[in-house]
Image: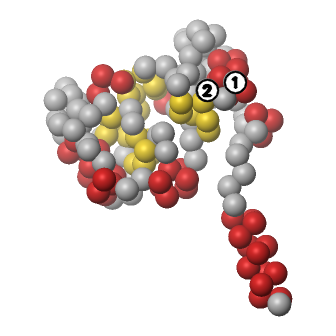
Amino acid sequence: MKLLHFTIAISLALTTIPAQADDIRFGDNKSEWANDQECDDRRFYGTGMANELDNADTGRDANDCRKLFNAGKIKLWIEGEAKAATQCSKIDFGDDKSEYAKDDECDDARFEGRGMSSVVVTEDVGHDAADCKASCQNGLIFLRNY
């Protein structure tokens, strides 16, 4: 019986609880793109995101990101959840037509992680196949929208 209670307790502890706005440090509004009605912070994903995302804007677009998060248009990207949802063998990585293809960094905005370029734009979606496929297979990137 103790084992059953222990197993249930562990299962409950490992259950992902969706992030609440009060739990997130949105940062400040020092981004050049702050207050433009789009979230420019790469920690998030969803329909309210900007078309170009730069690591320099992380934590620098608080008003936009908080508003969109509270409206349910964006979610906090959580690497563990993304990793569990990403099946590299089932992803169509596209082609290598991006001007930044084959530079050992994934430039495809569908992904996030340590194998990513510091700046990504939606125009490169599906156009950096070799880099993104290798990074995915090596566990360096995962899907943003999982």
Whole-percent x, y for residue 135 in the image? 32, 51
Residue denoted by label 1: 71
For this view, does 31 lie left or right of residue 11?
Answer: left
Q: Where is 142 relative to 128, above or below?
A: below
Quarter of the picture containing the N terminus is: bottom right
Whole-percent x, y for residue 54 in the image? 46, 26
Residue located at (20% from left, 45% from top)? 130
Relative depth, front residue between 62 and 103: 62
Relative depth, front residue between 138 and 15: 15
**Tag count in the figure?**
2
Q: Is residue 28 visible?
A: no
For this view, does 22 lie left or right of residue 73?
Answer: right
Secondary structure type for disc 2: loop
Residue located at (43% from left, 20% from top)? 51
Secondary structure type for disc 1: loop
Whole-percent x, y for residue 34 in the image? 61, 13
Q: Is residue 4 visible?
A: yes
Residue located at (69% from left, 64% from top)? 14
Disc 2 packing (10 Å; few <14; some 14–19; many ≥20)? some
Residue denoted by label 2: 73
Q: Where is 70 relative to 145, above or below?
A: above
Return the residue found at the far top: 36
Q: Are marks 1 and 2 in contact (CB under 8 Å)?
A: yes
Relative depth, front residue between 123 and 42: 123
Q: Amino acid at mark 1?
A: Ala
For this view, does 18 lie left or right of residue 131?
Answer: right
Residue located at (55% from left, 11% from top)? 32
Question: Which of the 4 image quadrants contains residue 25?
Answer: top right
Disc 1 packing (10 Å; few <14; some 14–19; many ≥20)? few
Q: Amino acid at mark 2?
A: Lys
Q: Where is 108 relative to 51, above or below?
A: below
Whole-percent x, y for residue 98 in the image? 21, 28
